[in-house]
Amino acid sequence: MSLRLYLVEDSPIIVRLLRELFDGTATLDVVGQSGKAPIAIEEIIGLAPDAIIVDIALENGSGFDVLRALLERRADYRPITFVLSNFATQRYRDEALRLGAHYFFDKNGEILGLLKAVISCSEGTLERNGSHG
């Protein structure tokens, strides 16, 4: 059984990179993607993926909007949440974790760490235990 993953990212370059990194991984299945917070929220709630990767800065809204909506709307549904952002300040990390994110990665050097964490998650060897980095 593979981990169902949803990407909340508005950069076509990052989306393509993530899809290429995850392509061919037998334990992962990217089930959807959106760079707009309202669409991502609706699709995540409808698809109920096992995990999501969320960028903070989005085309329409923010990753914080996505995290907040999931926290407020679906107390019974808690996907494993990885934040991937260029805004890797402590303030942003703390806010993401407060809103239910499990891990936080900096786009400027931690993408391979994100990849390893998502693959570990899909193999059942990663726990939901807080921020990376």
Image (cartoon, rainbow, N blue to C red):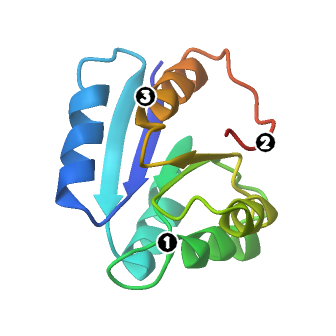
**Viewer-nearest of discs 1 and 3:** 3
- Mark 1 or mark 2: name the one nearer the start of the chain: 1
Q: Is residue 48 left or right of residue 23?
A: right
**Viewer-nearest of discs 2 and 3:** 3
Task: State the image coordinates of residue 119 (x, y, percent, origin top left).
Answer: 49, 21
| Closer-to-camera residue (88/29) | 88
Task: State the image coordinates of residue 63 (x, y, percent, origin top left).
Answer: 52, 70
Q: Are marks 1 and 3 in contact (CB under 8 Å)?
A: no
Give SS at disc 1.
Answer: helix
Q: Are marks 1 and 2 in contact (CB under 8 Å)?
A: no
Disc 2: which residue: 130
Disc 1: which residue: 41
Q: Is residue 13 left or right of residue 120?
A: left
What residue type is disc 1 on? Ile
Instruction: Name the outermost residue toward the bottom.
Output: 60
**Viewer-nearest of discs 1 and 2:** 2
- Mark 2 or mark 3: name the one nearer the start of the chain: 3
- Residue 16 marker: none
Is residue 99 positioned above or below 125 on the image?
below
What residue type is disc 3 on? Leu
Disc 3: which residue: 112
What residue type is disc 2 on? Gly
At x 78% / y 42%, what residue is drawn? 130
Give SS at disc 3.
Answer: helix
Is residue 24 positioned above or below 132 on the image?
above
Give SS at disc 2.
Answer: loop
Q: Dividing the picture into quarters, in which one does residue 25 lie?
A: top left
Q: Residue 73: in sight, yes or no?
A: yes
What separation in Å lies between label 1 and label 3 (alpha carbons)? 26 Å
Task: State the image coordinates of residue 128 (x, y, percent, origin top left).
Answer: 76, 36
